[in-house]
Amino acid sequence: MVEQHYLKLGRDFTFPEYEPRYPRDPSYRLKHYRLELTINVGERSISGVASLTITPLAGRGGTLELDAVDMRIDGVEADGKALEYSYDGAKLLVKLPQKLENEITVSVKYYTKPRLGLHFVLPDEHYPNRVATIWSQGEPEYNRYWLPIYDYPNNKCTSEIIATLPRDFVVVSNGVLVSVEELGELRRWHWRLDKPHSTYLISIAAGLFSEFKERVGDVELAYYVPRGREDDVKRSFGKTGDMLRFFEEYTGVKYPFSRYSQVCVTEFIVGGMENTTATTLTEMTLHDELAHQDYSSDPLVAHELAHQWFGDMVTMRDWSHIWLNESFATYFENLYLLKDKGVDEFTYELHRDLQMYLDEYSKRYSRPIVMRVYKYPEELFDGHAYPKGGLVLHTLKNLVGEESFRRGVKLFLERFAFSNADTEDFRKAMEEASGKNLEWFFEQFIYSAGHPALKASYSWDEQSRALKLSLKQTQGDDSPSVYNLTLDVALNLEDKTVKHTISIRERDVLLYLPCESKPWHVCIDPEFKVFKALEVDRPLEELIQALRRCEYVYCRLDAARALGKVGGFRAVEALEDAVKHDKFWGVSAAAARALGEVMGREARDALLRCLNEVKHPKVRNAIVEALGNFREDKEVAEALKRVLEKGDESYYVRAQTATSLGKIKLVENQETLLKALGTPSHNDVITSGALHGLAELSTDEALRTILDYTRLGKPTPVRISATIALAKFPGRKEVYDRLWELARDEYERVRMAVVRAAREMLDPKLLPMLDYMASNDLNERVKRIARETARKIREQMEKGVEYKQLREELEKIREENRRLAERIARYEVKGV
């Protein structure tokens, strides 16, 4: 047996100065946090008194250390007596009374104009019609910018916020609303949470909101949306109650609080944030009936609600264990999808999660899910913590069995309710519930980087009446050399399906699976129970039959993608049939994209026929995306124009159509795209699609238009798209100048778009800008990705490879090879 090497640290995640980060060790127990604040909206400032009730730990009293960035400290006292303190602009050190052993409440009076943590989104000269909103975002360590606080997850407390604002504002915070007091032109709102939670989850949102309420059992559900968006509430949040009941039933643990609010705010920097009992969401999740054809708030709503159990009730002990929050919320979001829409949608979403993780793995880095070597906590909120961790939980569930998995989850939640836990705590709970030793599993999948990569081939052995199956583990040096895996193998016969369960404990395995006759298709892990990358060598005929006949979505998706790489007229026929007739839209969409990979006239004609016949918006989206691969094709362009101008077509189909119209590279389509810029749509997606289409044309007028759409005054999603689109104009001075300006933009998501554009361009001229962002940006995510992009550029410079040019050459060769394969296939069918 091959020696196994676990605990692989991966590649490219760390930088030279990175060191292990261990949990903070506070000298006191924080019991209650009370904040009285007045928000001066016009000044964008706050003045307040933060009162912390603490109990010093034995033998460690003397100094109270608080995180407080860029504040004016106006005084610190306890029991009416002033306390000595020192403050350096980041840490507030308070000298406590000598021989303090009992509970004490320390109050800090302060004033600040926060640069982070608390955001003022108000009408201004650029956005005069904006609905005023003020909201906080504390995760991971941004509450220190507006609260004097212990800003780390491992010191939980109860909390209350008493906030005074102009009377037009509605205020939402953690817990229940205790009172609202009228003070002339002001109102004072008092919210209180009586269950301990981590301080990064303390939050406030204030705005001109409309409120809606309902009850699910003993829990009050509340929805807050900007005024004018009332009609979108039920469409966006209508399944919240069903989700809550499902999570209670699945975990065996009742919703841990008495109330749950969801607040939609303007310019939120992420999709959602699971503040305890008071989730903050982007207003972009609100949508109208036309958007509802192929857009849903359900995944976001389910994800943030799941966090109330995983993250809020039980919170990771330190940031290295963030997967206990994010992987669980990701997987429970998918489990609700399984309950709500069935196994095909569930499997498809797992497959998408796998592709998201593999994209990060191949293009950026690999790291263990539990990673202690980092610089910024926000670096850990990535494809390893979200989709990969969710897939590992799915694998674990299938290893121990769903009943044991649910028992383990319940035990974990109950044992660590309203406290902190780490990965070992979860492992022990799962071992106790399942009766299995799981150390090997956690070392392979949680504490080591990488993933299993399998290459499979098989043949029929007539003499032994068995399928000869070869499996090779091909993962690289950043992964364990051998994974222990248990896989199902389905042998599809004409009248039945025979299943075998196999165990893999070596790098190379050769198995003989008895079967009464030769199977027409072999499906490895047909229900996608195991996290892995799988490559299977299959002949054309089997791929066609698998796409047409296999009952498993996972296998049909794999067959569709494989046929796109094989090409030829028979592949085109099978793919067209799948686009039109497969019972699940996800397979139809995969088949459409595969036709776009095949290229050639036959694939083009098949896609045009599908465009005329298929009605499902998500499949149509894939069709128009695939048609964008047919450069300089006027017939395709005319078909796309008709879709773009069709008023009842889905917003998202029209947005993709605009992008594809530009990718065809016919300058005559420019006017159509310029006209499309003014088309109203959900989150301005059609405008964004048109900008990306214009960028593909690379004309001077397109560049002028795109530059104009990066300016303040345009909607932020549009500015983001325009900024990314600038990457299509390398070598233009005005592009570099504008990117430098946008690198200092006040909107974080726009600055992130600057880095994304730079990552596409990989131009050494952008290094000074990227180095500046890596050193000076306020946001940790922007710093990380800017530095990562700069490193990638320097690596390419050292290699002396012009990667952009190389990619273009490879694409030309790839397209020529496909066309050649198609011509050969036509000759074969004619008998030439």
Image: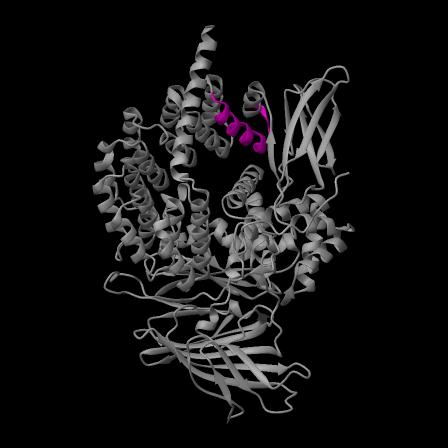
Q: Check the picture and name the quadrant holding the C terminus.
A: top left
Residue in view at x 28 percent, y 46 percent: 680
Give how far across and how far down residue 252 sits, in percent: 66, 56
The vertical placement of 359 against 144, above or below, is above
The reply to whether residue 112 is in sight is yes
Give how far across and how far down residue 83 sits, in percent: 52, 90
Name the residue at the top extreme. 831
> What secondary structure is the magenta-colored segment mainly?
helix
The reply to whether residue 678 is in sight is no
The vertical placement of 567 against 623, above or below, is above
The vertical placement of 445 against 154, above or below, is above
Way the structure is coloured: one colour
Does residue 521 appear to the left or right of 67 in the view shown? Answer: right
Give how far across and how far down residue 786 sits, in percent: 42, 55
Q: Which residue is nearer to you in this view: 682 or 178?
A: 682
Name the residue at the bottom extreme. 81
Tell me where the magenta segment starts and ends, as one range: 549-567
Q: Which residue is nearer to you in this view: 21 or 132?
A: 21
Q: Quadrant of residue 193?
A: bottom right
Q: Check the picture and name the quadrant holding the N terminus.
A: top right
Q: Which residue is nearer to you in this view: 448 or 750?
A: 448
Does residue 212 appear to the left or right of 695 in the view shown? Answer: right
In the image, is residue 824 part of the stretch drawn in magenta?
no
In the image, is residue 565 part of the stretch drawn in magenta?
yes
The vertical placement of 800 against 461, above or below, is below
Does residue 381 appear to the left or right of 487 in the view shown? Answer: left
Callout count: 0
Q: Quadrant of residue 169?
A: bottom left
Give how far across and how far down residue 606 sits, in percent: 40, 22
